Image (cartoon, helix red, strand yellow):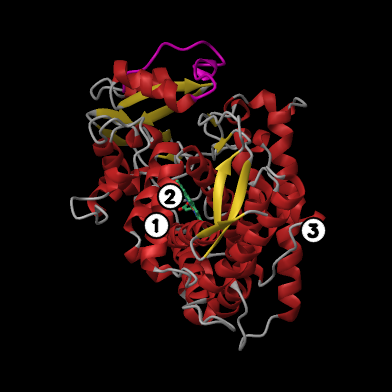
């Protein structure tokens, strides 16, 4: 393929790239942290280069300008998804996020998903003074999270907050999608939301099983882990969908699943939607549920780690909360009046870059990039980690410095915030950016309004991530002290 690519592009050059081995290509040169290896390769080959992963040519794109070219200016040509073995496990490959079929039907699908998420998030709160349903779900879950933290702390002193965070965040998306929440000790729920590192590694860019077909038939953890996980996830979602199909009432839309059933019922009336099958429309709930908890909970797990690693930053956020909202429960609209907290969250996005690559893209037609010929169906990796650590954009990128996002008046520098690449951009941009930003803000401010987080005495904190689709920090423990009216109380 590469030779064909090179000869077809005789008039138009093909991108440069390293020499590769037969069968395995450059797969095993990527090491434990592929985004770093690719950053190194960029020094030699430039912003655009070509690798071979197994037998598959993969285009790697770095640098803000080149990424904008691919995702925005020439977005239509790079908006496909490659045919990846691991992707096919989620709802049999029919999903919005992973489907290989890109075209008018897919665009319609994204519109339907976006509308369902927006409408249900912004729906009226049921019983509180919250501004919308999403805010109500988030405030309920964070207050439960604080209770769980206090219980864990009184039992064990130091504790690892990971499972509690994951349950709280998964409950938000569960409430939006299915109108239901689960107890943090519910076994059925834990089986679904307690993803493990093998799964995250297997779902990442550069899983050997996606590129070397015969590996799929071997009993390897990296193959079986995602298969088992997605089977369980699909089963869990199917049960909720079945239940909704039986109890659906068109005059009383309870949640996103009902909203999607409603689209199916109305599709012949609206004419445009009949190119999408009912199963595709309903599978949107797999996308939203699947994408909505691991990302946000990993971000919070990183945030709490940074807060105990840099207690002075935690103290500044607490001062900002005390000075501007006091003891009033934080709300989405408070993001405007807590610029330092917003700066901290953006610095977590940038520094941790816990999604180092977008989901892989694929070209939908022959195209050219930076003068190189790129054939149709070329798998494309966008190295977001590189953009977030690019020395031409960021002063001392390896330093964690929330202040970099504030201007001389201590206001949020919005044009710098836009340079952080964590939700992707253009046609394939994340659907949940607003939900995620609002949710993360309420979790962090509510926890810090009530608790002071501390590292355990003598513990060594490690800020290097474990590589995966979403990169988590290594497990850590924290301790808490309760804050009452600005004063600390011991448990
Ligand atoms: C896609 C990041 C939270 C729904 C993506 C992509 C990224 C991303 C990088 C891929 C973009 C691309 O392929 O170019 C994040 C981050 C989150 C987050 C960092 C949290 C901090 C959420 C939430 C939801 C969501 C809360 C929904 C409830 C989706 C969907 C897609 C997606 C449906 C697929 C879009 C497509 O294929 O066109 N997200 N996401 N995400 N995200 Fe998120």
Residue 275 on image: x %, y % = 51, 66
Q: How many marks?
A: 3
Looking at the picture, tell me which residue is in the foreground, 72 or 134: 134
Q: Secondary structure at mark 2?
A: helix
Q: Is residue 207 left or right of residue 393?
A: right
Label 2, label 1: how far apart the Cα atoms are? 6 Å
* Residue lying farthest to the left in this orientation: 408
Instruction: Report which residue position mark 1 lands on.
Output: 319
Q: Is residue 167 visible?
A: yes
Quarter of the image with the C terminus in it: bottom right
Marks 2 and 1 in Cβ contact (< 8 Å): yes
**Residue range corresponding to the magenta coloring:** 15-33
Q: Which of the labelled discs sits on residue 186, or is there none?
A: 3
Q: Residue at x 34, y 24 (%)?
A: 49
Which label sits on residue 315? Answer: 2
Vertical placement of residue 41 versus 408, above or below: above
Q: Is residue 233 above or below residue 20?
A: below
Residue positioned 63% across, 60% down in the render: 146
User: Which numbered disc flags the more N-terminal residue, 3 or 2?
Assistant: 3
Question: Toward which corner of the image does residue 471 lie, by quadrant?
Answer: top right
* Label whose residue precedes the other's in the sequence (1 or 3): 3
Check contact, mark 3 vs mark 2: CB within 8 A.
Answer: no
Disc 1 to disc 3, C-alpha distance: 37 Å
Residue nearest the observer in this picture, 20 or 37: 37
24 within the magenta span:
yes
| Outermost residue to the right | 187
């Amino acid at each position: 393929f590469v030779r064909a690519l090179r000869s077809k592009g005789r008039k138009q050059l093909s991108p440069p790239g390293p020499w590769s081995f037969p069968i395995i290509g450059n797969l095993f040169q990527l090491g434990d942290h592929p985004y770093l290896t690719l950053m190194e390769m960029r020094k030699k080959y430039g912003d655009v280069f070509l690798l071979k992963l197994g037998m598959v040519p993969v285009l790697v794109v770095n640098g803000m300008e080149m990424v904008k070219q691919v995702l925005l200016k020439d977005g239509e040509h790079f908006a496909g998804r490659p045919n990846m073995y691991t992707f096919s496990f989620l709802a049999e490959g029919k999903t919005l996020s992973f489907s290989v079929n890109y075209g008018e039907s897919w665009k319609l699908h994204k519109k339907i998903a976006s509308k369902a998420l927006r409408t249900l998030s912004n729906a009226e709160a049921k019983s509180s003074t919250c501004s919308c349903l999403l805010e109500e779900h988030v405030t309920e879950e964070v207050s439960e999270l604080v209770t769980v933290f206090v219980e864990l702390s009184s039992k064990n002193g130091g504790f690892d907050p990971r499972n509690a965070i994951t349950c709280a965040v998964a409950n938000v998306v569960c409430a939006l999608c299915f109108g239901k929440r689960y107890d943090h000790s519910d076994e059925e729920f834990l089986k679904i939301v307690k993803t493990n590192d093998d799964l995250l590694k297997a779902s990442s860019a550069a899983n050997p099983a996606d590129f070397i077909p015969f590996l799929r038939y071997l009993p390897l953890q990296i193959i079986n882990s995602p298969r088992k996980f997605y089977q369980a996830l699909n089963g869990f979602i199917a049960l909720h969908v079945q239940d909704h199909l039986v109890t659906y009432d068109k005059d009383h839309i309870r949640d996103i699943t009902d909203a999607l059933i409603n689209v199916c019922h109305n599709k012949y009336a609206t004419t445009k939607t009949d190119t999408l099958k009912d199963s595709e429309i309903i599978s949107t709930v797999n996308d939203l549920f699947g994408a909505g908890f691991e990302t946000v909970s990993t971000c919070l797990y990183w945030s709490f780690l940074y807060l105990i690693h840099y207690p002075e930053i935690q103290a500044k956020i607490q001062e900002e909360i005390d000075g501007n909202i006091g003891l009033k429960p934080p709300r989405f609209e408070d993001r405007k009046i807590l610029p330092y907290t917003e700066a901290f969250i953006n610095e977590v996005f940038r520094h941790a870059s816990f999604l180092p690559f977008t989901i892989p893209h694929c070209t939908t037609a022959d195209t050219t990039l930076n003068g190189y010929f790129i054939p149709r169906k070329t798998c494309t990796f966008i190295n977001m980690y590189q953009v977030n650590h690019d020395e031409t954009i960021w002063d001392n990128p390896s330093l964690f410095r929330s202040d970099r996002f504030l201007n001389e008046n201590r206001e949020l520098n919005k044009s710098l915030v836009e340079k952080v690449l964590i939700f992707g951009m253009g046609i394939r941009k994340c659907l949940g950016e607003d939900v995620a930003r609002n949710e993360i803000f309420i979790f962090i401010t509510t926890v810090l309004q009530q608790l002071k987080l501390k590292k355990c005495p003598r513990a060594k904190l490690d800020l290097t991530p474990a590589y995966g689709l979403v990169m988590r920090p290594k497990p850590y423990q924290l301790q808490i002290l309760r804050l009452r009216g600005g004063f600390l109380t011991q448990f």
